[in-house]
Image (cartoon, rainbow, N blue to C red):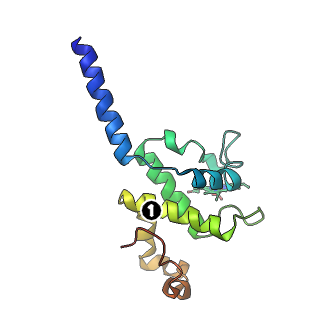
Amino acid sequence: MLRFLLAVCLFCVVSKTQAGDAVMLPNDVQEILKRNCNHCHGTNDPEGEVRLDTILDLDLNAQLDLLNRAQEQLFLKRMPPEEEEQPTASENERLRAWVSSELAKHDALSFEKKLQKPEYGNYVDHEKLFSGEYLDLPGFT
Ligand code: HEC
């Protein structure tokens, strides 16, 4: 009986933390990943050994690490690779906003912090940075 109660407690604690802390993958974002990324980052011989289709199965640290790497790729416009079909502008924006907001939610914006260092200055398109184009992205306040 005691063992049973312990198991129930443990289950409650685990599911509670997951509900509060886990990375959320809304359906529309999942669809964007499916359309634009998962044929290279899915079950079959994933490119760069990066899988995006199973992100929800990872532990939080691994999820945040993956999101940071994804944010870097998206920011530098390296993914999907140039010669591939590209997401639409709105898909792209949605994907970036999702990555940013998940990282911000977990206070894990390491790539965005890296960008503020001088050696990354060259990557930041200053005109864009100050144009207000990024103002509607959540998580920067
Ligand atoms: C045509 C295949 C292809 C598609 C589509 C594709 N990728 Fe990649 N991806 C690659 C290859 C190849 C690599 C490994 C080599 C590299 O880093 O350039 C990679 C590497 C990555 C990495 C790891 C980079 C690192 O930190 O080393 C991430 C993150 C990533 N892709 C995210 C994405 C996202 C997000 C999308 C969809 C928007 C996407 N990829 C679409 C081929 C693809």
Q: Position of 47 compared to 113: left or right? A: right
- Residue 80 sits in which quadrant? bottom right
- Residue 116 sits in which quadrant? bottom left
Image quadrant, ligand 1: bottom right
Q: Is residue 72 visible?
A: no
When the figure is inspected, residue 32 is found, relative to residue 56, above or below; the finding is below
- Residue 12 sits in which quadrant? top left
- Residue shown at 49% from the left, 76% from the top: 120
Residue nearer the viewer, 75 or 91: 91
Residue nearer the viewer, 133 or 123: 133
Give the residue furthest to the top. 1
Quarter of the image containing the C terminus?
Answer: bottom left
Residue 51 locus on image (x, y percent): 60, 45
Check disc 1: other Cα within 10 Å, few if <14, some if 14-19, many if 20+. some
Give the residue furthest to the front. 27
When the figure is inspected, residue 44 is found, relative to residue 29, above or below; the finding is above
- Residue shown at 70% from the left, 41% from the top: 45
When the figure is inspected, residue 25 is found, relative to residue 57, above or below; the finding is below
Does the closest atom of ligand 1 sit within 8 Å of the Cβ of label 1? no
User: Could you tell me which secondary element the residue under label 1 belongs to?
Assistant: helix
When the figure is inspected, residue 2 is found, relative to residue 19, above or below; the finding is above
- Residue shown at 28% from the left, 15% from the top: 4
Residue nearer the viewer, 82 or 5: 5
Residue nearer the viewer, 110 or 24: 24
- Residue shown at 64% from the left, 50% from the top: 48
The residue that label 1 is drawn on is 101
Q: Is residue 60 visible?
A: yes
Residue 96 locus on image (x, y percent): 55, 65
Q: Amino acid at mark 1?
A: Ser
Residue 70 locus on image (x, y percent): 55, 58
